[in-house]
Every structure is written in structure tokens, then in C-alpha cells.
Amino acid sequence: MSEPAIFKAKALIAKAQHIVVLTGAGVSAESGIKTFRAAEGLWEEHSIEDVATPQGFRNDPQLVWRFYNERRRAADIATPNPGHIALARLESLRLLRQKIKSSSAPFMILTQNIDGLHQQAGSQNVLELHGSIWLVRCTGCESLRDDYPIQLPVPPRCDECGSLLRPHVVWFGEALEEAVLAQAEKATRGADLFLVIGTSAVVQPAASYPFMAARRKIPVIEINLEKTPVSEIATLTLLGKSGDILPKLL
Ligand code: BJW
Ligand code: ZN
């Protein structure tokens, strides 16, 4: 990746007052978390319909829980990589620099990831679009808990009402939480720079946010190993690992 591109990206970041960052599985790849759509990715080993849809869970909750128990184990041993840490540092520098109070935050991460690694790296303003692997929801009484052991019994049942528990994540065909959608759209409308990092940008509605920003003529910087649909509208596409590129942008 060329030095002039890094220089241009740094200049856009220095000028921006309201940075919104959309992240995907690629940002956690260097922490040892599998992505979805790569060769040897999660969707090569598992059928999407079986493990990431409400119908799949209804048909075989044991299979789905074995999948999420394995993901909980992987997320538990993972630690933030230099990409996560650079984003957290960028946010803290922005908070120090913020001079005027504004209704839009100076820095916000919209993550499709459920692993919690941005928060573990110290990022404060993180919106989890697809939920969290650490939250478990009761399909009966809707109670939400984060204090279950890393490996749950298969399938787990609610202490309160005995109903089946499910991971608090968003599967295909399920709507994102309304409050989450509203916050993501508000942040995107208030952004004056949009970064898209480590996502194939094919899953809606997350993939639509960089396009919304581009329609408002906001610069969009993409960081990915390869080109994606976002590359068509990006001001800059920086090809490479986010853990290598992000620290260079500070
Ligand atoms: C690196 C790297 C390194 C690797 N450095 N880069 C409009 C049009 C068409 C379809 C739809 C539409 N609206 C809705 C849909 C349907 C569907 C959808 O989008 N389908 C498309 C796939 C066709 N969307 C939904 O169903 C959504 N729901 C919805 O819209 O509901 C509407 C509704 C309203 C009212 C009632 C009912 C419904 C929900 C989508 C939920 C997605 N869920 C998952 C699972 C979450 C839980 C879990 O993690 O288990 O989310 S699927 C999976 O994909 C996961 C991810 O968050 C998501 C995105 O994947 P991501 O992060 O992009 O990963 P990859 O693997 O694809 O890409 C990794 C990238 O990183 C690659 O580009 C690499 O090159 C790169 N990379 N190493 C930098 N080191
Ligand atoms: Zn319950």
C-alpha cells in the first residue's frame, strides 16, 4: 500500500470532526477470530441456514449452541490486535481534542462483530449492530444475562422460566434493534468522515451506511485485504491488514 495513500488518509482524519467507523470480521482476524466468507471461514464450515437463522435454531438448537459455544471459546481467548488498539487510541485523542459540545459524537464505531474486542481495547462509543456473543436471551421471558459460563450446557435453559436460551445476536431474517438502527443512522447522518474496515460489505443494513455517507459527499476510507462493493464509492481504499494500516494512521 502506497505512502501517498496513507498520507491522504491521515489528512482526511486530521480534518474530520465526526468520524464514524464501520467494522467487520476482518478487524478481528488478526486476533485469531475467524471471518465468515473467506476460504476456511465460518460459512465454509457451517451452513448459514442451519446456524444463523431463526428457523435453524428452531430445527436444531443443539447444533446452533455448539457453534456459539465454539465461538465463545475463541472470543474468550482472543485479545485486541493493533487495529483495535489504534481505533481506541484515535477515539481518546479525539475526545481530548473536542472543543465544542455537539449533538454528534467525535468518534463512533458501528461494529458488526459480536466479540467485544473493540470495548476490550478501550473504545468507548461502540454500537454492536449484530448483538453480543456474551449476552444470552431467554426465548420465553426475554431476560438478558451476561453471567453465564463461557461454555453453556447444550442447549441451555432459563433459570427463571425453563424456556430455551439463545445467543443475543442478530440472525438473517431478524430485524436489528430499533434503537440500534436509529443510533447508527443518526451517527451516519452526522459524520463528516466514514471509515469502513474489514467487512465484505454485503450484509444489510450495515453495508448501506457507507453508501449513505457517500451520497452526502462525505469522504469514505476503506481498509481491507481486497476490494469490496464499497471500493466503488470510496474516496480511498487502503489494501492490507487493518492491524498494519490503522496504527500508521494515528
Ligand atoms: C480483512 C482482514 C484483515 C479479512 N484486515 N480486512 C437488502 C437487500 C438484500 C438482502 C437484504 C436486504 N435487507 C436485508 C436483507 C437480508 C439480509 C442480508 O443482508 N442478506 C445479504 C447477505 C444478501 N439481512 C438481514 O437479514 C438482516 N436483517 C434485516 O435486515 O432485517 C430486516 C427485517 C425487518 C423487519 C422484520 C424482520 C427483518 C440481519 C443480518 C444479520 C447478519 N448476521 C450475521 C451473524 C451475526 C451473529 C454472529 O456473528 O454469529 O452477522 S451474518 C455475518 O455477516 C455476521 C457478520 O456481522 C456479517 C458481516 O460479515 P463481515 O463482518 O463483513 O465478514 P466477512 O467474512 O464477510 O468479511 C470479512 C472481510 O474482512 C473481507 O472483506 C476480508 O477481505 C476482510 N479481511 N482479514 C483487513 N486482517
Ligand atoms: Zn426465561
Image (tube, helix red, strand yellow):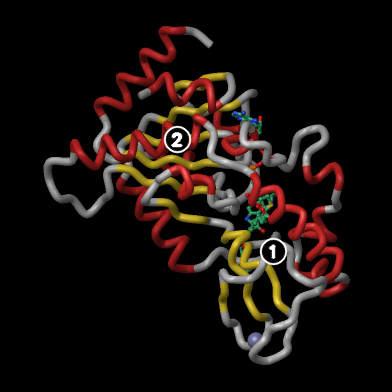
Farthest residue, direction top: 3
Find out if the beta carbon at label 1 lies less than 8 Å from the nearest ligand 1 atom: yes
Q: Quadrant for residue 21, please give it.
A: top left
60 or 214: nearer the viewer: 60
The label number, if any, that marks residue 85 in the structure image: 2
Which quarter of the figure is the C terminus placed in?
top left
Residue behind mark 1: 173
| Residue beneath the point at 86% across and 64% down | 63
Find numbered disc 2 in the image and state the secondary structure of the residue it sits on.
helix
Query: Residue 84's spot in the image, x, y percent?
Result: 49, 37
Query: Residue 44's spot in the image, x, y percent?
Result: 85, 42
Q: Amino acid at mark 1?
A: Gly
In the shown orientation, is residue 220 left or right of residue 70?
A: left
| Residue beneath the point at 56% across and 63% down | 176
Q: Is residue 121 above or below residue 157?
A: above
Camera-side mark, 1 or 2: 2
The label number, if any, that marks residue 250 in the structure image: none
Query: Residue 225's spot in the image, x, y percent?
Result: 63, 24
In the shown orientation, is residue 160 left or right of residue 235?
A: right
Find out if the beta carbon at label 2 lies less than 8 Å from the nearest ligand 1 atom: no
Q: Is residue 57 above or below residue 210?
A: below
| Residue beneath the point at 82% across and 61% down | 66
Q: Are marks 1 and 2 in contact (CB under 8 Å)?
A: no
In the shown orientation, is residue 200 left or right of residue 118?
A: right
